[in-house]
Structures are given as C-alpha cells and as structure tokens.
Image (spheres, grey):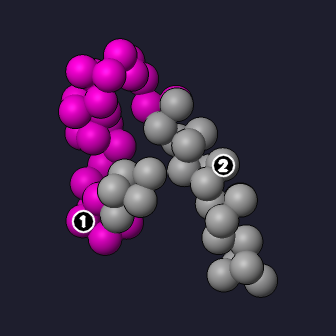
Amino acid sequence: MSHIMYEKYIGALPLYRQKKGFGLLCVSSRTPIVSWIITCSKKHLKSVYD
C-alpha cells in the first residue's frame, strides 16, 4: 500500500498506469486500488489530518 501511495503522490504516477502492473494480480479496474488508499488513509493517517 505504501508503494501505491508513494508512486501516486510522490512519483506522480496515475492509478490507471499503476493498474497495469496490478493486472497480473487480477485487479481489472482502479476501484479496488482507490478503496485501498481511502481505507488506509482513514485508518492510519487520521492523526496526521488532525
């Protein structure tokens, strides 16, 4: 998860391009990746937001 977020926010690599790499893991759309980011952000980054 940290790699996905790093590539998206630091490396400026859009999720649609990251999705190509996850195609090997049977991830066919960006929806699961986006939900992973949202879930992890809510769980682990709340203290940073506050």
**Residue assigned mark 2:** 39
Tell me the amino acid under the disc marked 2: Thr
Residue at 31% from the left image edge and 71% from the top image edge: 10
Q: Element under label 2?
A: helix
Specify the label residue 11 is tagged with. Answer: 1
Of pointers 2 and 1, the one earlier in the residue sequence: 1
Q: Badge 1, how many Cα within 10 Å: few under 14, some, many 20+?
A: few
Residue at 23% from the left image edge and 30% from the top image edge: 20
* Residue 41 on image: x %, y %: 63, 60
Q: Is residue 10 above or below residue 37?
A: below
Q: Is residue 38 magenta?
A: no
The image quarter containing residue 23 is top left
Position of 1 with respect to 20 (left or right) is: right
Q: Is residue 5 above or below residue 30?
A: below
Q: Is residue 25 something that shows in the picture?
A: yes
Q: Is residue 5 something that shows in the picture?
A: no
Position of 2 with respect to 43 (left or right) is: left
Residue situated in front as seen by the camera: 47 or 9: 47
Give the position of the C terminus as an image quadrant. Answer: bottom right
Q: Is residue 26 magenta?
A: yes
- Discs 2/1, front: 2
Specify the farthest residue to the right: 50
**What range of the chain is rendered magenta?**
7-31
Q: Element under label 1?
A: loop
Residue at 34% from the left image edge and 64% from the top image edge: 6
- Taken as a whole, is the magenta stretch helix, strand or loop? helix
Position of 17 with respect to 28 (left or right) is: left
Q: Is residue 49 above or below residue 14?
A: below
Tell me the amino acid under the disc marked 1: Gly
